[in-house]
Image: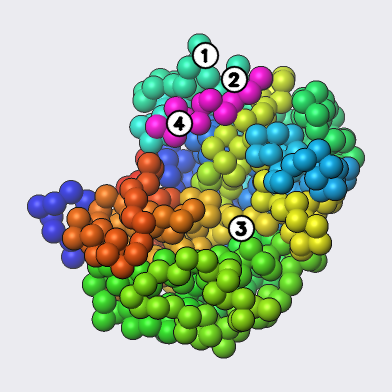
Amino acid sequence: MRDFQLPGRSPVFATNGMCATSHPLAAKVAVQMLEAGGNAVDAAMAGAVLLGICEPQMTGLGGDCFVLIRPSDSDEIVALNGSGRAPAALSAAAMRDRGLAAVPPQGPEAVTVPGAVDAFCRLSRDWGRAGLKASLAPAIHYAAAGVPVAPRTAFDWARASDALQGAAREHYLLNGAPPRPGQVFRAPQQAEVLRRIAMEGRAAFYEGEVAEDMVASLNAVGGVHTLDDFAATACEYTTPLSGPYRDVELVEHPPNGQGATAILMANILAQFDLAALDPWGARRAHLEAEAAKLAYDARNRFIADAGQTRRLDHMLAPETAEKLAALIDPDRPMADAAAVSESVHKETIYITVIDRDRMVVSLIYSIFHSFGSGLASEKFGINFQNRGAGFTLAEGHPNEAHGGKRPMHTIIPAMMKRNGRVIMPFGVMGGPYQPAGHARVLSNVVDYGMDPQAALDAPRSFPLEGQLMLERGYSDAVRAELAGMGHDVATPESALGGAQAIVIDEESGVLQGASDPRKDGCALGY
């Protein structure tokens, strides 16, 4: 139990239904959907689409999503891949010929066709109860009426505003400046797009005037997108991946998502007795940093579009984790994970909802970098993601940029199982941090027995570009100890990710919701 004399918050308890997400308005809308008779899919969609208005720097109709669903009558988890593909004419060779070493993150080359709208329409049809019109109604209302900008959203908006280009500056700045906390943001053009989708389904977005606006806007800045690329967009059901950690099971999305990275990192950490270590101490932070380096090196080697991913079984194999764990020096950081592991290998929103019938939804929805590519369609202001920056230009690599392929994706929803039953849907935002965030939340709950809110409140660390990022929640003594071990310790400019979780009490069935204080959101139940 937390110290009630110190800042913090308690988990939220409820018996009927629960939502945890990064903005209070989206959580409220989701719970209202449940109270009105909608199920967890209806509620998750209502909250997620609204988050594109509440947090447009994080997500929107121009993005992708991944979803895990546990139906109310089964413990078999269903995965839906709502990520889009590169336009057919995209060519890594052409970019190499232009002298590029990577896909430009703020250019049309990075814009993959948005997949989320197709996935939302499919979800509503296959799993929803209330219907697409009901799920989109809250976002339509608030896009037209406006939403007061929350503090963390305003902070992120200001940091990313210089990335906005052309029409995006007209649609996402207020009088040429990023909004301040409390200023009202409206997106009436997106309200119109949502009205059309509510009435006509996916065709209203991927065909006709809205698609023409997106294609023309991209072509005007050098994109090779066509109307055929948009019309061909289709989400896919896939089989989730899973791996054991102590007495629980971690369930993740398969490639092109990086869920296998989280499972591999957890498998590496399982080789160590973390429970014997100080949860906020230097030793745990060091082991997590080294495990992350090794797991991410494997990700960079192998994960790509599902048809091109190599050696997935190798990534998930227990012996791979054992061999990688043996490479970790308990006292010194490795300089180059790729060289060390060679012998072994030869911006985002998250929402989770549980309804009274115990359907469980874990959904993540993103445009990648803050404001994605920084580009938006001229008429309707659809903010284009830059997921194509997840491709590589290395010739022959499984994740090489190519028309019709999905890039390696960072966004990964998750669920935790025990004895075959789902006990916690959760997700961690934060681009590349996400697998490490999954491993940390998992360990906080399993190794240290934290309640879900404490598990999300806890300070975080992450190795990034040669530095070990430590949030300000770590003590000066821990920073000094890690520096003495050889880590280049730094404080991140912004908090590491954000997270949401709901625990299902295995004895009582009571729901415990948790929402990350690094974001503006909350957990709400009824």
For the residues labelled 2 and 4, the Cα–Cα distance comes to 14 Å
Q: Is residue 358 left or right of residue 331?
A: right
Q: In percent of the image, x 53 and y 85: which residue is there? A: 323
Mark sitting earlier along the chain (1/2) = 2
The Cα–Cα distance between marks 3 and 4, rounded to whole angstroms, is 29 Å
Q: Which residues are magenta?
A: 155-168
Residue type for callout 3: Val
Number of marks in picture: 4
Magenta: main secondary structure equals: helix
Q: Residues within 10 Å of mark 1 (few under 14, many from 20)?
A: few
Residue type at mark 4: give it: Arg
Mark carried by residue 481: none
Kind of residue sitting beneath label 2:
Arg
Inter-mark Cα distance, 1 to 4? 14 Å
Q: Do residues under tags 1 and 4 come within 8 Å of each other at their CB atoms?
A: no
Which residue is drawn at the image coordinates 29% and 79% (left, top)? 275
Residue wearing tag 3: 67
**Residue that carries the numbered disc 2 in the rendered image:** 169
Helix, strand or loop at label 3? It is strand
Residue at the outermost left position = 5
Say which residue label 4 marks: 159
